[in-house]
Amino acid sequence: MSEPQAPVRIGLLGAGRIGRLHAELLSGRIAGATLAAVCDADPEAAAEVATRLRVPAVGSAGELFELPEVDAFAICTSTDTHAEAIVAAARTGKAIFCEKPVALDLEEIDRALAAIDESGVFFQVGFNRRFDPAHASVREAVSSGTLGDVHLVRISSRDPAPPPLAYSRASGGLFLDMTIHDFDMARFVTGSEVVEVYARGAVRITPELVELGDVDTAVVTLVHENGALTVIDNSRRAAYGFDQRVEAFGSRGVAASENPVAHTGVVRTADGTRAAALPYFFVERYLPSYAAQWTAFASAVRSGGTSPVTGADGRAPLAIGLAAGRSVREQRPVRVEEIA
């Protein structure tokens, strides 16, 4: 009988909201991976997570990258710091997981990916929605040929409430922070690159976004290399909960992912039908997919397999997002090659 493999020991850089989510998952919920250390620019944030999860807190990224008891790194800091952290982590020769988006401009992401290529380390981007079983079933229906030739993909992505204005100032805006998931999903489902983007945006929820040059409501049309079209609608505020749906329509049929509900119970009376509400927060909706992406990461790192979400998968949605921003500003379709 072969000996069980030791878990991949993860050093977490960034103990904010998403970093804490990953830390919780890695503390005993992921087969094949475990949390080994925590670091944050705010020592108190790192100490709080480290104490609660019973792992060491380290004082700097440099110190984290030098720890011999760490096998891989999770970069969960603010997006504008990702590239620098990736370059430094790549020098260690250890595997890297990085939250999306990898960067806010192509020059920075190319610098980070060049460091990955030079070192040859394993690298995975945190597009967790690829690991959602419902969304994955839509991709499978397309890739297996069940739907025939895919003609049209529709993606609805609506958050229950807008983020704080301070977050919007640093996040890169709607297209690079929120819609980037949908740009990735469009490539993932169709299996085809995006060649043209036409986007329209509006400020319908948070008036202060006008000063930032950002929008909170948008419709985006993508033209794929294979001729398929994807239509995406976004809103920062859906009063009824976290709304995430994907549909693929092809020559032989249609496949769709619906929103989960808290439970399947319904009440029917003469006044109508009542059902449970949608999840209100992204953690409720996508916690299983976050866990699944870590399982995939650990499995690939331990087996020497290929990354399920590569650096190229991180770059392409960024280029689409930048094209969408230009499309809104210039009120015209934008070819991705103009950006990339």
Image (cartoon, grey):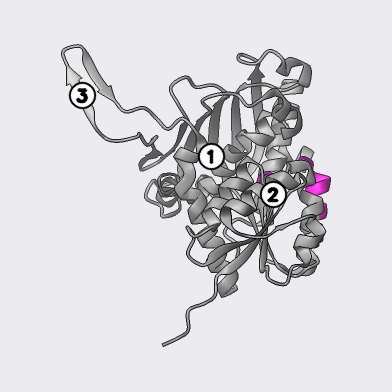
Quadrant position of the C terminus in the picture? top right
Residue 220, x across and y down, in percent:
60, 28
Residue 192 visible in image? no
> What's the residue at 16%, 13% (across, down)?
270
Few, some or many residues within 10 Å of mark 1 (<14, 14–19, 20+): some
Q: Position of residue 241 (x, y in %)?
A: 45, 26
What range of the chain is rendered magenta?
A: 99-111
Residue at coordinates 47% horizontally, 64% vertically from top-left?
31
Q: Is residue 111 above or below residue 173?
A: below
Question: Which one is in front in this view, the residue at disc 2 or the one at disc 1?
Answer: 2
Alpha-carbon span between mark 2 and mark 1: 46 Å
Q: Amino acid at mark 3?
A: Val
What is the number of the mark on residue 267? 3
Distance between the alpha carbons at the discs numbered 3 and 2: 46 Å
- Marker disc for residue 46: 2
The label shown at residue 228 is 1
| 52, 213: nearer the viewer | 52
Q: Earlier in the sequence, mark 1 or mark 3?
A: 1
